[in-house]
Image (cartoon, rainbow, N blue to C red):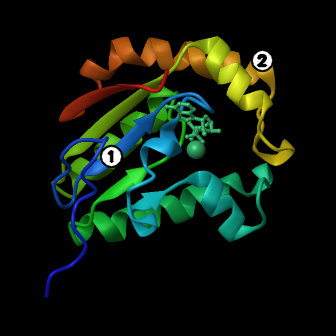
Amino acid sequence: MKHSTAPEGVLGPIKPGDLVVMVGCSASGKSSLLAAVPAHQIVSLDRLRAVASAPGDQDATADAVLLQHQILGMRLRRARTSIVDNTSVEQLHRLQLVELAHQYGRRCVAAWVDAPLPTCLARNALRPDHERVPEDVLRWQHAMARAARLTLPNEGFDEIRHHRTA
Ligand SMILES: Nc1ncnc2c1ncn2[C@@H]1O[C@H](COP(=O)(O)OP(=O)(O)O)[C@@H](O)[C@H]1O
Ligand SMILES: [Mg+2]
């Protein structure tokens, strides 16, 4: 039986079982790049916080992380492609995902997404309340994402792709 195909398109070729880790600040354009990806292949803590509790409930993060780990493990075991649509601006979070993919013998691909800070701030300001992050948080995420570009090559990823959305 033929199952769903890899999400080709702006993200570039993805092999079955690949774990793709989006890396970019809020409003950098990560989710927009995934517009053509089947929804079931996208795993995000935002979504899983809502599943575990309610949209925007940051207190549900620990449960969302548990769910993410379980879901990714199940998908990696079956060689199902997954895209992790979090900011992943913290190196520890990226290293954990690389390790998980490799535990299952799968490839881990980083998709670094960048836009100028003023663009991200403007997009963020236009968002509804529950999707908007505080400006100081966005500035921090943006700086962390820019720094990540330099360290990604040493984090064990099998492939690194760069995307600019403005
Ligand atoms: N290439 C682009 N050009 C113009 N606007 C964009 C582009 N990519 C994303 N946006 C807009 O920026 C906002 C944030 O994009 P989104 O993909 O949700 O970011 P993220 O998932 O990184 O938080 C959305 O309103 C989206 O329409
Ligand atoms: Mg998003």
Which residue corresponds to mark 1?
Answer: 20
Direction right: furthest residue: 129
Q: Quadrant of the rendered structure where residue 27 is?
A: top right
Ligand 2's quadrant is top right
Q: Residue at x 54, y 54 (%)?
A: 44
- Left or right of residue 8: residue 29: right
Rendered view: 154 above or below 75: above
Q: Residue at x 59, y 18 (%)?
A: 142
The numbered disc on residue 113 is: none
Rendered view: 70 above or below 96: below
* Residue type beneath disc 1: Val
- Left or right of residue 138: residue 24: left
Which residue corresponds to mark 2?
Answer: 136
Tag 2: Cα neighbours inside 10 Å, few (<14), some, or many (≥20)?
A: few
Q: Can residue 38 be seen at all in this image of the molecule?
A: yes
Tag 1: Cα neighbours inside 10 Å, few (<14), some, or many (≥20)?
A: many
- Left or right of residue 141: residue 22: left
**x and y percentages locating residue 89 in the rendered image:** 52, 28
